[in-house]
Image (cartoon, helix red, strand yellow):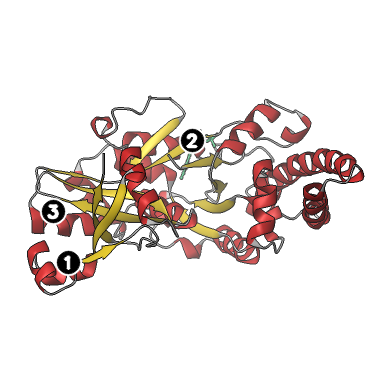
Amino acid sequence: ALTTGIVGLPNVGKSTLFNAITQAGAESANYPFCTIDPNVGVVDVPDVRLDRLEQMINPQRVVPTSFHFVDIAGLVKGASKGEGLGNKFLSHIREVDAIIHVVRCFEDENITHVSGKIDPADDMETINLELVFADMETVEKRMDRVLRQKKSGEKLATQEHDVLSKILPVLEEGKPARSVDLSPEEKLIVKSLNLLTMKNMLYAANVSEEEVANPDGNPHVQRVKEIAASEGAGVVTISAQVEAEIAELDDEERKMFLDELGLEQSGLDRLITEAYRLLGLITYFTAGEKEVRAWTIREGTKAPQAAGVIHTDFERGFIRAETVAYEDLINSGSLAQAREKGLLRLEGKDYVVDDGDVMNFRFNV
Ligand code: GDP
């Protein structure tokens, strides 16, 4: 499954946020095969389209698609030099598909800040530089290797060397590898290096309960937004504390609590939605009397590979996919009516699945 790692300096609210995530967590009954790792939180991806499909079809059960968060505590200044449990944590970050970087924007005299003051710009730089340093080391090592291979005339080594030569000077300026303008082919060449700063990053500005309805009144949040904009990164404002409290409530209480705070959606739902978008993920649906279900794929996935998310047999034996766009199905009122109107398409193996497609796969076993 696709995974987002949560990073940040100590005492910024990572564990509080992560605990809220695990408490609000997806029902494990839906995920019988996923082993429960204490550092991994599984959450349902909120999607109103599922509710509407449920109303229309009235199935026995509805299964949302899910998303994984990993708590990566322990990133401190000097991690890339092995401070704290440095390198171990960096290797955990290497495994994730995207990064959520929690930045402390709440003031609280009782909770010490590692550098003694609330300064988001400084905190962001500290963490980001550790990631940059770790990548510099990776790139330099790899450079040495490809240089040797290049000398012995390997063509691929020359190509890789060219890409690395674009990345290294940017890292040396303290900037992330994702800010280097690379073609898709070039990205593929360095993909296996798993550079930390090549991963997409979303900042979570952690504000106090009082500020959560109007976070822009907090100058620290403004600062986070400015910096994020300059990096092309996203920002979600959230109060980890509030999320932890919300996670303990049932649905009705939660709605009342959010109303009181002047919020429409919990911060966690916004965070999940944003992280999903950040990863370039989209959703397709299967919809039958027995089960209405959402499935996650990467944007650009073709029908057989989309079917493969359900079962490898579906991909191997793929024949075609009966497909209707979500809007068309809802507007038609039923699958039968959508078919009558000619809105149900038969798509083959080259079809690129769209967000919201409702699909029924035909396959050979
Ligand atoms: P971590 O080290 O980043 O995992 O930080 P924690 O989640 O353990 O939080 C550190 C301390 O800050 C804890 O005592 C939390 O209760 C507190 N904390 C977290 N979020 C908030 C917040 O939004 N407001 C306030 N006042 N305290 C918070």
Earlier-in-chain disc, 1 versus 2: 2
According to the image, label 3 marks what residue? 54
For disc 1, the neighbor class at 10 Å (few under 14, some 14 to 19, many from 20) is many
The residue wearing badge 2 is 70
Q: How far apart are marks 1 and 2 (CA)?
A: 36 Å
Q: Name the residue under label 1.
A: 329
Residue at (16, 57) in percent of width and height: 53
Residue 79 screen position, x and y as percent:
72, 33
Real-space Cα separation, disc 2 to disc 3, in angstroms: 31 Å
The quadrant of the rendering that contains the C terminus is top left
The quadrant in which residue 22 appears is top left
Left or right of 149 in this view: 54: left
The residue under the point 60% across, 66% down is: 229
Q: Which of marks 3 and 1 is in front?
A: 1
Report the amino acid beneath label 2: Val
Q: Residue furthest bottom?
A: 341
* Disc 2: CA contacts within 10 A as few (<14), some (14-19) or many (>=20): many
Q: Is mark 3 on a helix, strand or loop?
A: helix
Element class at badge 1: helix
Residue 154 lies, in percent from the top left, at: 83, 46
5 sits to left or right of 149: left
Q: Are marks 1 and 2 in contact (CB under 8 Å)?
A: no
- Residue plotted at (60% across, 64% down): 232
Q: Is residue 238 left or right of residue 5?
A: left
Tell me the amino acid under the disc marked 3.
Answer: Glu
Label 2 with label 3: CB-CB less than 8 Å: no
